[in-house]
Amino acid sequence: MVHCRRRRNLLATATAVMALAQIPSPAVGRGVTVVRSAIQGAQNHFPAGLFRWYQGKECGKEVDYCGVIDFCTDGLNYGYANYGEQCQPFNGPTIRLAPGKKYKLTLRNTLPQGNKNNTSNLHTHGLHIVGSGDGDDVTREVQAGECMDYIWDIGRDHPGGTHWYHAHMHGLAEKQVGGGAFGMIIVEDNPRINPDVPMWAKYERVLQIFSQLGDGNLIVNGVRGPTPNYIQVEGDRWFRLRVSAIDWIGDTGDFEITGCQYAKIASDGIWSSVVPMPQERSYSIGAASRADFAVRCPSASKRWPGVVRFNDKVVAVFQLTQAVSQPYALQIWEPSLPPSLQGIKEAFVPPQNTYDITMTLNTINGRSWDPLVPLHIIQYDEVHEWTIHGSDKHPFHKHLYHMLVVSPGGCGQHKEGEFYDTIAGADSEGSCRVRFRAADFGQRELLHCHSLPHSDFGAMAWVNVVGTNMPRNDNVSPARQCMEGYTTTKQQGGGGNNNNGGKRFGAP
């Protein structure tokens, strides 16, 4: 690849760049992209296909990689797709990121123009990146027929983990996310923090489970139930199962695997304090949360030894193949934390850094969403302790910084001493105490109920993070008309038109 030196029109040259660089096309739609793992003989599978990043002069010299993702519709549902490809409702392309790299993502809104309900944006749920400027600021908007650039600066100390992305347009989140506008994000394991990540954890499978209101069925990796997913894995080999659970009304789900050994190893993109955690029969996974598991299915037990259930519904079956990779044992491992998460439990928290949050159907602390006025002001690079009231009924999600649970005994399924970005449980007193450090950046930090109707009703707010020597990101990239001769992403069933008529895309 050519090193980024000057900015050119990415949208107009995407096809040419792929041909010159001989980049293989990831699978799209319901196909599976197969990628070699770091373990010889083992392969990683991504059922949604992989998002296509480019590297070269088209990106400009400010970033390492760039790419275009389409916000789209198949005529019935919302979804995402690689630029100009078939729309993927409930199963957007999996986006992989690396610590220490800077990315420019162009969100292209291909929905029909003239409808205010087709305005959208994008949120990187779980990433530790700035929430202002052209970062993860959900107050930005891209109208139908427009493009808007996001800059994702993944720090050198960003932990590896499992996250997801989704539309976050206030007032339309229920409609768009509930209609299928979401996908997975995976940040590669960071050798700067943990150079000793177990080898078996490099053998990966993914499972994104969406609970749809109404018919009681689940949509798993883009496939609507009751038909389960069949996931091929080698017998008698430990592998890492990345699970993302999405419930648009905020309910918690029960996750269980029968016929295989399994134990939890990470929550909301952060390694557990000890890997693996003590095994439990089943695990509760809150709305909008992720959980990674170490799984091993013995090949000698029966033909379909591993069955995955979510809320008592079969969502996946492990289909065993003959083992050809080297076996690795599951041994006790204690991961290291990135600097932003270290020393929080032991830190002294002054009274001014304590705060109470009360969640209701349509307010936080009695106030409805106001994009101009912050709910609270907190100090940059200090440890804060918040007590969250009502999180058992209103899942509390906080952008930018992960939260350490410090309530004695934990908060429901959230263990004391572990990190999360969404709290959907309460302690014995009916609340949940958490701590976090406002590290690395500040400015706008969003927080809200992750029942999407409640968030749309007004249960959303932001705090202003201020302080001396705090890096600022005030570089706002406005939405722009990104095409002439407007065309739409290919729809399922062969609809849509991907011919740009020779016109150049992306120029302001």
Image (tube, helix red, strand yellow):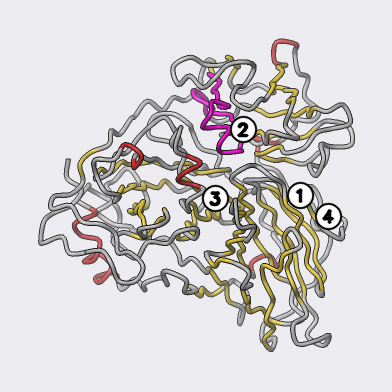
Image coords of residue 337 (percent x, y): 70, 43
C-alpha separation, residue under disc 1 versus residue under disc 2:
24 Å
Provide the residue designation for mark 1: 272
* Front-lying residue, 469 or 505: 505
Kindly identify the residue that appears in the image at 61 percent across and 37 percent down.
450
**Amino acid type, label 1:** Ser
Under circle 1, the secondary element is loop
Closer to the camera: disc 3 or disc 2? Answer: 2
Under circle 4, the secondary element is loop
Q: Which mark is residue 164?
A: 3
* Front-lying residue, 326 or 288: 288
Kindly identify the residue that appears in the image at 36 percent across and 55 percent down.
73
Kindly identify the residue that appears in the image at 47 percent across and 41 percent down.
123
Provide the residue designation for mark 4: 277
Left or right, 431 with reference to 99:
right
**Amino acid type, label 4:** Met
C-alpha separation, residue under disc 3 versus residue under disc 1:
19 Å
Q: Which of marks 4 and 1 is nearer the N terminus?
A: 1
Q: Which of marks 1 and 2 is nearer the N terminus?
A: 1
Provide the residue designation for mark 2: 449
Closer to the camera: disc 2 or disc 4? Answer: 2
Relative to residue 147, is residue 296 depicted above or below?
Answer: below
